[in-house]
Image (cartoon, rainbow, N blue to C red):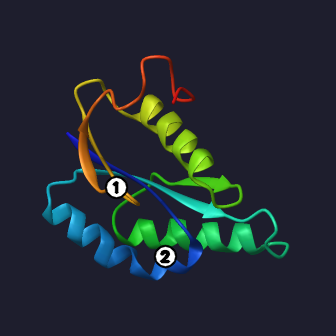
């Protein structure tokens, strides 16, 4: 199976339909999508944005969604994605990561020393 692992900001929720359609066309079968929320956001914004994220994903046929409340930075996002991949994927799955590098990797795409290893 080919899975996609991606972390996105709330303003990108509106793009999820196009995003999913694009990657489904490339053979992605499972989406491990995380909404990154800033801890400094106004009170209630994180819950409101996450509810919209889940609702949007539901319209695309997904019931799996993740949330990361942390300032936007690569180490935190990578740690979150590796943790999700460790729990959600089988060793024979393939992972497509998006972001600065858009590439297809065989599982385990996680360092042998665990998700926090670099």
In the rendered image, the residue lying farthest to the top is 113
- The residue at the point 49 percent across, 76 percent down is 13
Along the horizontal axis of the image, is 47 left or right of 88?
right
The 10 Å Cα crowd at callout 1, few under 14, some 14 to 19, many 20 or more, is few
Report the residue at 21% width, 53% height from top: 28
**Drawn side of residue 1 relative to residue 61, left or right:** left
**To which residue does mark 1 refer?**
101
Q: Position of residue 79 (x, y in %)?
A: 56, 39
Q: Residue furthest right?
A: 43
**How far apart are the alpha carbons under marks 1 and 2?**
20 Å
Q: Nearer the viewer, residue 104 or 18?
A: 104
Q: Nearer the viewer, mark 1 or mark 2?
A: 1
**Earlier sequence position, callout 1 versus callout 2:** 2
- State the mark number for residue 76: none
Q: Position of residue 57 (x, y in %)?
A: 43, 66
Question: Is 83 on the left-hand or right-hand side of 41?
Answer: left
In which quadrant of the rendered view does residue 20 lie? bottom left
Residue 14 higher or lower than 54, as above or below: below
Q: Position of residue 45 (x, y in %)?
A: 75, 74
Looking at the figure, which quarter contains the N terminus? top left
The x, y position of residue 72, in whole percent, is 64, 61
Neighbour tally class for label 2: few under 14, some 14-19, many 20 plus, Cα within 10 Å: some
Which SS class for mark 1?
Answer: loop
Above-or-below relation of 40 to 88: below
Q: Are marks 1 and 2 in contact (CB under 8 Å)?
A: no
> Above or below — where is 64 with respect to 61?
above
Label 2 belongs to which residue?
13
Residue nearer the viewer, 110 or 61: 110
Q: Secondary structure at mark 2?
A: helix
Looking at the picture, tell me which residue is in the foreground, 43 or 117. Answer: 117
Name the residue at 29% across, 23% down.
91
């Amino acid at each position: 199976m080919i899975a996609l692992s991606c972390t996105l900001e709330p303003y990108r929720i509106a793009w999820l339909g196009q995003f999913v359609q694009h990657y489904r066309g490339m053979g992605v079968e499972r989406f491990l999508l995380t909404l990154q929320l800033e801890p400094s956001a106004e009170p209630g914004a994180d819950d409101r944005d996450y509810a919209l994220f889940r609702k949007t994903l539901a319209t695309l046929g997904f019931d799996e969604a993740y949330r990361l409340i942390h300032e936007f930075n690569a180490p935190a996002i990578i740690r979150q994605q590796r943790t999700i991949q460790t729990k959600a994927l089988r060793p024979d799955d393939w992972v497509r990561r998006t972001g600065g590098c858009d590439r297809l990797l065989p599982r385990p795409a996680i360092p042998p020393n665990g998700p926090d290893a670099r």
